[in-house]
Image (tube, helix red, strand yellow):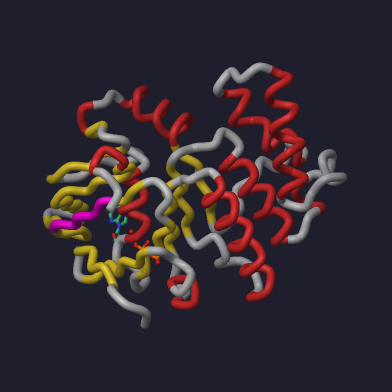
């Protein structure tokens, strides 16, 4: 069993309500979860069940209405907005459905960016970017712009960018949603390999049941709560 101190994400009885005119609507109603380093976790849930809401709370983009969200032991509600931005930049990597690469930067510049924002020394950045682009199979495409790459290639750049600074936490929102089945599987293989190599904690949101088969743990967001699925479907 992992020790409690290795927890990367802890949600305790988290409620999130949105106002709709005079009324409020609870999207999360007492969601709890603890995830550790080295765990590859998939979060399933129908459209509108609150998966993106949950990712926004874990990354400190938004705060819960009630309950606690802790990342590496820090209660995000006690941090300033600036501290939450720094935590996001330093401790979390993100992969999005729409890739979200910066179109005016080359492949290499996209992967360098998070390292430069963190003020890493130039020689270290050069070596890391070269290593990562080789690992994601894009050595030789350093100077290409994202619009010259296929969807699968763009997502591989996004995976390299997300993991460039070896974050302890990787959050992915439908990372294969815009890819065909074969390409999606290749991107997942890569993502999983890099996550496991870095012993990171990964939470991957998906509609794809097949993805759950490769996860260490699977949670389903149902009626505002997180239900862990035990055993294989
Ligand atoms: N800022 C907001 N203000 C009001 N309602 C919101 C806001 N953000 C999300 N919601 C509502 O909360 C519910 C959950 O949305 P969320 O985007 O978290 O779901 P999801 O599970 O990620 O859906 P999908 O799989 O379709 O992306 C939806 O009904 C949505 O309309």
Residue 109: quadrant of the picture: top right
Which residue is outermost to the right?
140
Question: In the picture, which quadrant includes the C terminus?
Answer: bottom left
Does residue 95 appear to the left or right of 121 in the view shown? left
Does residue 191 appear to the left or right of 208 in the view shown? right
The residue positioned 37% from the left and 41% from the top of the image is: 59
Does residue 138 appear to the left or right of 29 in the view shown? right
Q: Is residue 52 magenta?
A: no
Does residue 216 appear to the left or right of 70 in the view shown? right
Prevalent SS, magenta region: strand
Residue 141 lies, in percent from the top left, at 84, 46
Q: Is residue 33 magenta?
A: yes
The vertical placement of 117 against 201, above or below, is: above
Ligand 1's image quarter is bottom left
Residue 165 lies, in percent from the top left, at 56, 33
The residue positioned 32% from the left and 54% from the top of the image is: 53
Residue bounds of the magenta highlight: 30-34
Residue 91 lies, in percent from the top left, at 44, 34
The residue positioned 63% from the left and 48% from the top of the image is: 158
Residue 212: quadrant of the picture: bottom left
């Amino acid at each position: 069993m992992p020790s409690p101190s290795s927890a990367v994400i802890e949600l305790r009885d988290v409620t999130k309500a949105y106002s709709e005119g005079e009324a409020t609507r609870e999207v999360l109603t007492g969601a709890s979860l603890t995830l550790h380093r080295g765990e590859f976790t998939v979060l399933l849930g129908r459209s509108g069940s609150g998966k993106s809401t949950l990712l926004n709370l874990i990354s400190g983009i938004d705060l819960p209405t009630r309950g606690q969200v802790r990342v590496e032991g820090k209660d995000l509600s006690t941090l300033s907005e600036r501290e939450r931005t720094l935590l996001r930049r330093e401790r979390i990597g993100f992969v999005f459905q729409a890739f979200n690469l910066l179109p005016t930067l080359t492949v290499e510049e996209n992967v360098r960016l998070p390292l430069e924002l963190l003020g890493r020394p130039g020689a270290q950045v050069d070596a890391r970017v070269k290593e990562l682009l080789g690992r994601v199979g894009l050595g030789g495409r350093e100077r290409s712009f994202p619009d010259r790459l296929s969807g699968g290639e763009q997502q591989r750049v996004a995976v390299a960018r997300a993991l460039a600074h070896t974050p302890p936490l990787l959050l992915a929102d439908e990372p294969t949603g815009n890819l065909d089945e074969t390409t999606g599987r290749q991107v997942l293989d890569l993502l999983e390999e890099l996550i496991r190599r870095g012993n990171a904690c990964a939470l991957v949101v998906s509609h794809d049941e097949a993805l759950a088969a490769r996860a260490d743990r699977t949670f389903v967001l149902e009626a505002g709560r997180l239900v862990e699925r035990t055993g294989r479907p």
